[in-house]
Structures are given as structure tokens and as C-alpha cells.
Image (cartoon, coloured by chain):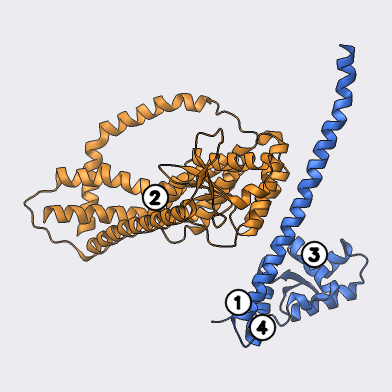
């Protein structure tokens, strides 16, 4: 089956600047170098943004079309599509590299179980915080009630 | 031959309508879910279930109210009209769909009965104020489950009982009782009857909405919501990651994503989620009059409609 993506680098290989500009393009939809530099990326030099976008284009993560003397860049894939493909590539590499196909799957299950347990721990902590807030709230309401009762 | 032709034509009409309306439901349910998003989650669950059942209801109503009577009343009995290949194939498809649905539902019933029998071997009744029997069962069973369709009962495992506080147990029990009141196990059985490819996402959205609806029905304050959230976490830690038994409503359902969404929702509980008794809207007051008017129009034009349907089935048979 023909793969859906043909980019030469996964997003895990992206540098911080590349990630930042890709995020900007996901947020804006399309942009030229000038629009990015004049917008939220004034801290970056025009040539830096131009070179980085060109690099992302060469990695097949962006498409571009000429607009006057500049290019308008657009992300080739949505964030979800890119993440799915990166995860798929990682799993495929892991499965190909292992002599026993079930071994990487057992690692995966182990990681998911650990992650689930961590998630439950975090949620449990959150519940305790909320319960404490509730107890503190009802405790702070009680002294306010008592003087009234005393007056009555 | 007359009877056989009648069966083939009726089954064929049923299959065509069922498949077309199921495809329409597959394509439109996300819009319905988006439309219903701001309504209480119980209503969302009811709407999704109604939408899921619409194809079979629509196909059955048209077949039983129009196709069968039009064939019986308007088809000459003496005629020896050959059946075309297409109605025979679609008729067979209709019969196979019905048989597949029945087999699917019977299998689910059998598996559920076997699992419940295993879990309740040596079960002891618990003393609770609920009208539904609550049984203490072995540790091999899920933490807490509402089981049974005609004879509902709530099963609580020894392990779950030992880790839950009394408030958490009450909230979890209320959740399961809400499933019993909403007849969710019966709805699951009905879904087994109408199995159709491409409906998995709709069914899992309904399942998620019905779990959240039971959560909402079980709690009336933030304290109770936190108790239920804590009970869910404790039950999640006890429950093995295994495929849930069909036709039962377990307190904990994997995957973890669904559980965490429920727990986060409970932690963020607000007073506006408190269940309110249904109010009679102005539209609902007009509903009986509107239904009567539709019925009168239906009766007045029934003969014409039968003739049209008969023409359509004649075209189908040829």
C-alpha cells in the first residue's frame, strides 16, 4: 500500500524554531514570511524565518505558492495527521527492529498501563484538593453562621 | 407462490429502506450530536439512541403499514408473475439481516447470562434501601455492574466494597441504579439486533453519553460528584483491562480516555447539572393535537398511499 505521507523528516526531528513556525502556520492557516515577521514573530530576522520555512518546505511539511515576489506557505498536514504519522512511523520502526513482533506490543501495553495509573493518580490528587476546598469552604461558612444564631 | 412473492417483496423493501436510512444515519449523526451538545447529556444519549434506532423503525413501519397491506389487498392472487433477480437478492439480504441481528443478539444474551451466572455464584444479598437487589459477588467480577434486562440487579465485588467509603459506595450505587432506570441494558440488546457496519462510532458515542447521563443522575452536589469520581478511580484500579461483557452496565469502562473524561467532568461539577424534573413546554401541549391531525390525514389518504406503494413494488419486482 502506498503510504499517505512522504515527508523526509518526522516532526520529532524538528528544531524548536521549525516547531514554532509550524505551530504558527497551523494557527493561521497560511502565511508569507513578511506576515509572520510583522505579526507575532518580530523577534526573528526575516532571513531566519525565510530559511526555516524553506527547510520545512523541503521536508515536505509545507506547501507553497508564489505570491508576487514571495511565497505563501501552508501546512501540508493537520496537527493530528502529522502526530498520527509520526507515531505510526515510530511503531513501525520498533516492530521492524524487534525479532519478536509481540515484544514491542508488550512494551506499549506496559507504557499505557503506567500512563493510565499516572493519570488516575493525578485525578485522585485533584479530587483530594477539591474535597479539601469543599471542607475549608464549609468550615469558613460555619463561624459566619454562629454570630447570627447567637443574635437570635 | 403468492405468499413467497409477498415475503420476498416485503423483505426486499425492508432491506432497501433499512440500508438507505442506515447510510443516512451514518452520515448525519455527528451533526445531530453537535446540535444536541448544549442540552443535558441525558437528552443527548436519548437522541443518539433514537437516531440509531431510526433506520429499523422507519423500515419496519413502512414495510408493515404499507408494503404488506398493499401487497395483500392489491396484488392479484392468481397471477403467476416471475420475480426478478434484484428483488430476490435484496429480499434474501433482508432475511439475512434479520437472521444476523437475531443471532447477534442471542449470542450477546448467552454470553451475558454466562458471565452473570459466573459472577453471582455464591452471591450474598446486601441490605440497601434500593428497590433493585444488590448482590455482593466474588472478586473476579467487575467492581460494580448493573446486570439483567427483565430482572435487574446490581453486583458489587468484595474488592470494591473494601476500598470504597460509604459516600463513594452510595454514589456508585446511584450510578448503577440510574442505568437500571434508563433501561440501558435493554437498549444495548436492541442495538445488538440492529447491528450494521459503520455504526460503531455512533454506538460508542451513545455509550459514553449514557455513562455520563448515569453520572449526572447519580449526584446532586459537588460532594457527591467527588465521591463518584473517587469511586470511579478506585474501581478503575481494581478492574482488569478486559473487553466489557455486553448487555451489562459496568461502573468502569475502558479505555482510560473515556474514564478520565468522566472523572474530569465530575470534578468540574456545577449546580446547573443537577437533574430537574421535565417541564411541559408549549410545543408538548400541542403535540396530541398535531398527532391527531397527522393521523386523520394518514387515514384519509391511506388508500392512495397503498396504491402508490403497490406501483413502486411492482416496479421493483420487474
- Horizontal side of B177 relative to B227 (left or right) equals left
Q: Give the percent coordinates (x, y) of residue B288.
A: 41, 26
The residue to which callout 2 is attached is: B55
- Report helix, strand or loop for mark 1: loop
Q: Residue at x 26, y 64 (%)?
A: B89
Q: CA distance from mark 2 to mark 4?
A: 44 Å
Q: Give the percent coordinates (x, y) of residue B289.
A: 40, 24
Q: CA distance from mark 2 to mark 3?
A: 44 Å
Question: Which picture quadrant has residue B151?
Answer: top left
- Labelled pair 3, 4 in contact (Cβ < 8 Å): no
- Report helix, strand or loop for mark 3: helix
Q: Colour of chain A?
A: blue
The residue to which callout 1 is attached is: A4
The residue to which callout 4 is attached is: A93
Q: Nearer the viewer, residue A6 or B170?
A: B170
Disc 2 versus disc 3: nearer the observer: 2
* Chain for disc number 2: B
Q: Give the percent coordinates (x, y) of residue B98.
A: 31, 56
Q: For the residue carrying disc 2, how many other residues have a C-alpha within 10 Å: few (<14), some (14-19), or many (20+)?
A: many
Q: For the residue carrying disc 3, how many other residues have a C-alpha within 10 Å: few (<14), some (14-19), or many (20+)?
A: some
Q: Which part of the image, by quadrant, shows the N terminus of chain B?
A: bottom left
Q: Are marks 3 and 4 on the same chain?
A: yes
Q: For the residue carrying disc 1, how many other residues have a C-alpha within 10 Å: few (<14), some (14-19), or many (20+)?
A: few
- Labelled pair 2, 4 in contact (Cβ < 8 Å): no
Q: Give the percent coordinates (x, y) of residue B241.
A: 59, 62
The label on residue B91 is: none
Amino acid at each position: 500500500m502506498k503510504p499517505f505521507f512522504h515527508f523526509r523528516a518526522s516532526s520529532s526531528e524538528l528544531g524548536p524554531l521549525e516547531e514554532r513556525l509550524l505551530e504558527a502556520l497551523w494557527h493561521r492557516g497560511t502565511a508569507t514570511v513578511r506576515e509572520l515577521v510583522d505579526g507575532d514573530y518580530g523577534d526573528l530576522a526575516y532571513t531566519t524565518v525565510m530559511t526555516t520555512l524553506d527547510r520545512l518546505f523541503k521536508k515536505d511539511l509545507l506547501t507553497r505558492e508564489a505570491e508576487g515576489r514571495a511565497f505563501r506557505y501552508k501546512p501540508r498536514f493537520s496537527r493530528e495527521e502529522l502526530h498520527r504519522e509520526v507515531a505510526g512511523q515510530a511503531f513501525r520502526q520498533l516492530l521492524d527492529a524487534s525479532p519478536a513482533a509481540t515484544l514491542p506490543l508488550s512494551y506499549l501495553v506496559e507504557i499505557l498501563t503506567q500512563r493510565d495509573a499516572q493519570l488516575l493518580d493525578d485525578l485522585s490528587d485533584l479530587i483530594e484538593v477539591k474535597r479539601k476546598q469543599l471542607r475549608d469552604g464549609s468550615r469558613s461558612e460555619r463561624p459566619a453562621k454562629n454570630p447570627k444564631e447567637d443574635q437570635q | 407462490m403468492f405468499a413467497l412473492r409477498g415475503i420476498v417483496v416485503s423483505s426486499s423493501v425492508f432491506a432497501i429502506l433499512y440500508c438507505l436510512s442506515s447510510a443516512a444515519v451514518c452520515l448525519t449523526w455527528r451533526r445531530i450530536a453537535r446540535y444536541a451538545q448544549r442540552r443535558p447529556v441525558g437528552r443527548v444519549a436519548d437522541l443518539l439512541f433514537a437516531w440509531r434506532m431510526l433506520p429499523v423503525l422507519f423500515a419496519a413501519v413502512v414495510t408493515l403499514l404499507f408494503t404488506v397491506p398493499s401487497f395483500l389487498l392489491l396484488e392479484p392472487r392468481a397471477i403467476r408473475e416471475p420475480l426478478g433477480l434484484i428483488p430476490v437478492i435484496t429480499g434474501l439480504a433482508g432475511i439475512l439481516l434479520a437472521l444476523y441481528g437475531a443471532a447477534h443478539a442471542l449470542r450477546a444474551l448467552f454470553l451475558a447470562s454466562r458471565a452473570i451466572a459466573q459472577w453471582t455464584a455464591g452471591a450474598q444479598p446486601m441490605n440497601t434501601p434500593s428497590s433493585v437487589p444488590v448482590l455482593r459477588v466474588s472478586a473476579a467480577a467487575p467492581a460494580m455492574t448493573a446486570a439483567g434486562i427483565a430482572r435487574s440487579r446490581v453486583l458489587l465485588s468484595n474488592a470494591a466494597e473494601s476500598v470504597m467509603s460509604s459516600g463513594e459506595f452510595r454514589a456508585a450505587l446511584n450510578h448503577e441504579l440510574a442505568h437500571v432506570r434508563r433501561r440501558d441494558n435493554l437498549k444495548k440488546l436492541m442495538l445488538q439486533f440492529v447491528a450494521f457496519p459503520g455504526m460503531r462510532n455512533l454506538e460508542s458515542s451513545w455509550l459514553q453519553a449514557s455513562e455520563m447521563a448515569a453520572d449526572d443522575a447519580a449526584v446532586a452536589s459537588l460532594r457527591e460528584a467527588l465521591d463518584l469520581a473517587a469511586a470511579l478511580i478506585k474501581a478503575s484500579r481494581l478492574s482488569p483491562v478486559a473487553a466489557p461483557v455486553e448487555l451489562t452496565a459496568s461502573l468502569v469502562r475502558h479505555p482510560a480516555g473515556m474514564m478520565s473524561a468522566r472523572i474530569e467532568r465530575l470534578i468540574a461539577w456545577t449546580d446547573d447539572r443537577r437533574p430537574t424534573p421535565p417541564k411541559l413546554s408549549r410545543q408538548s401541549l400541542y403535540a396530541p393535537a398535531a398527532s391527531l391531525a397527522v393521523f386523520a390525514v394518514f387515514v384519509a389518504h391511506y388508500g392512495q398511499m397503498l396504491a402508490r406503494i403497490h406501483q413502486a413494488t411492482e416496479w421493483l419486482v420487474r
